[in-house]
Amino acid sequence: MSRFGVLKKPTPSVPTAATSTEVETPAKLPRQDRAGKVMVGGHFTSDLSRAVKILAAEQGTTVQALVGEALDDLLRKHGKHPFGER
């Protein structure tokens, strides 16, 4: 205990490379297909999520492509230029 009655945290020992049993993994690199893009999303029910995933599988496409198509349709509906991002 310190003189103020507070316990000091013990300093953890740092294992050296020779004694470490952990395997070092390379630093996670950013995905190239996401370069220059930002996330656009929302929270929906699990039923809607399941339905969209099933539709994507049935169409042989991705949820991302379906969402891009839906957003393009929404932009067209409101007189905006679609981006065609799939």
Image (cartoon, rainbow, N blue to C red):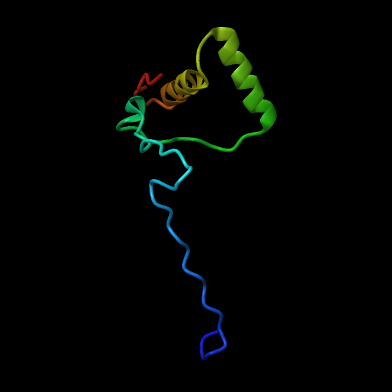
Residue closest to the far bottom = 3
* Closer to us: 73 or 21: 21
**Identity of the residue furthest to the left in this view:** 36
Task: Find residue 86 and report its horizontal and vertical position in percent.
Answer: 41, 19
Residue 82 x, y percent position in the rendering? 37, 22
Residue drawn at point x = 48 percent, y = 63 percent: 12
Residue depicted at x 56% and y 80%: 7
Please identify the quarter of the rendering in which residue 5 is found. Answer: bottom right
Q: Quadrant of residue 83?
A: top left
38 vs 18, nearest the viewer: 18
Judge by depth and name the residue closer to the eye, 59 or 9: 9
Asked whether, in this view, residue 5 is left or right of residue 16, the answer is right
Identify whether 49 is placed above or below 6: above
Position of residue 55 in the picture relative to residue 38 (left or right): right
What's the residue at 44%, 48% (across, down)?
A: 19
The residue furthest top is 59
71 over 21 or under it: above or below: above
Q: Pinpoint residue 16: horizontal percent, then vertical percent.
A: 39, 51
What is the quadrant of the N terminus in the image? Answer: bottom right
